[in-house]
Image: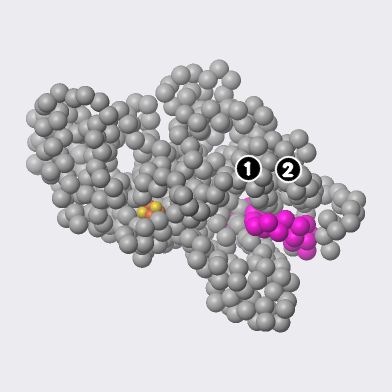
Amino acid sequence: MPIFTPGRRWQPAYSPFKEEPLSHKLMEDFEYMLKGPLFGCRMCGNCMLQETAFICPMECPKGLRNGPCGGSTPEHCYVDKTRPCIWYKIFERSFAMGREEKLLEVLPPLDWEKVGEETWHDVINCIKVNGTGKVMKSLVLNQGEDRWKTWDLIFRKVRQPDWWQGDDKYHAPAYTEPVSDLERGFKSGEFVVACEIAPPLSMSTKKLIENIKLVKPYVTAINFTDNASATPRMTSWACSKFAIENGAEPVMQIAARDRTRASLQGEILGATAMGVRNVLCVTGDSPVLAPQPRGRMDINDMDAIQMIWILRRMRDEGHYLDGREIKFPPKFFLGAAGSPFASEPKFQALREQKKVNAGAQFFQTNLVYDIERMEIWLNELAKRDILDKVYIMIGITPLKSFKMARFMTQVPGVVVPQTILDRMEAADKAGNAQEEGVQIALELARKIKSYENQGIHGLHIMPVGWEDIVPRIVTEADMLPKGFARPEPKGEMVPA
Ligand code: SF4
């Protein structure tokens, strides 16, 4: 195990992807021999150790460079349970050192031109640019913050290349008129409801379109997941297109797991040209949750925060990641996933702030069954002063059985209180589980709405294939959208 990084190297170190002079090779060997035992260095060539409390984030199986995923726990990484969540450790140490605010800086994805290379040349160049004597003097004579400032002078340029220019500041959207009904609903002060429809498992769209027509009058927008659990289904953009054709407003989810930076930028142009106006970025479940054979588990090209940063700049600054101008930039309302129960609330709040700073305008959270813990998370968001910068929709899933309730306890980032498990168990025995699940969902929905003036702006129902329960929940929770027109009865598709 490395001396400073509380884990072990996840995968072998990288080699450069090109021919190099001998002097560079020798420097690489030296760096590897030094930083390997100290930090478990993977020779990513884009070193950011000084930002991450000297714990190497490349120990994360997803290769995340901006904080923990929604499955982070104090006990272990959810992808590989034999190792700690390295981001939990980074957060823990950063908070202990009082350096947690450093973690707010949005860091770039790997520049693969540099992967496998040593970073010494870049560092030495930065020292020269800032004056070798001045830098050395400051490092020797200064203490505390002043010394850190000098460190930053040296390393900022190394970790923030010109094509990225990440920072720790809030970037408000560069437009004012809402671009979607979802955004319009939030801005008008409505308590907005969205729901999710499971994308089809085949090319048949019959059920998908039936479900879109069924829920459309009751919700403002419909989410389509992007290969949830890393398991293939119809794509989110295709489902979004069918929603638009049937008069509904989609929220197109994009998982970083299945994207490269090139495909992300191309896809967003195509989707917005088709009429998609809400985009939700997620890092995506690891293939460890997928059926076998499993896809690549050792790295993502980008994480959700990097996707948000790239997309906001495409929209508001009108250029691609490589700097080329976009003549007609895409328009969209940009969302992210919120995780009230992953890791610790104060860690998560920092991660959510980073998403908001990067450009997230709305959050849809993971499933919430524990309102008290949700409130703790909300208070942490308030401390970070972001509640007036983002619209928050809380996620709920109606339970159908005790088995499902127990399964939910295994889902990364989901907490089901014992009282709910007991209720579902008793109802299961009495043959009444579905109705009890609906009653629990209604109680949660009403409690969530009671936080309307404390930072919660809506409800996101994830019915996991039980779409025909959505109209009943929205109606009985008294959350029908403004101007609601009850659809004509059509046999069994109409809710009770
Ligand atoms: S739990 Fe998530 S963030 Fe933590 S090490 Fe595993 S994949 Fe990375």
Q: Is residue 88 visible?
A: no
User: Residue 291's x, y, as percent?
Assistant: 51, 54
| Residue to which mark 1 is pinned | 234
Q: Is residue 281 visible?
A: yes
**At numbered mark 1, what does the secondary structure look like: helix, strand or loop?**
loop
| Image: 416 above or below 260 | below
For residue 42: magenta? no
- Please identify the residue farthest to the front as the structure is shown: 293
Would residue 333 be found to the left or right of residue 203 on screen?
A: left
Q: Nearer the viewer, residue 349 or 77?
A: 77
User: Residue 333's x, y, as percent?
Assistant: 60, 37
| Residue 369 figure quarter | bottom right
Mark 1 vs 2: CB contact within 8 A: yes
Mark 1 residue crowding within 10 angstroms, few (<14) / some (14–19) / many (20+): some
Q: Magenta span covers which residues?
A: 452-476
| Image: 86 above or below 185 | below
For residue 471: magenta? yes
Q: Earlier in the sequence, mark 1 or mark 2?
A: 2
Where on the image, by quarter, is ligand 1? Answer: bottom left
Would residue 63 be found to the left or right of residue 391 on screen?
A: left
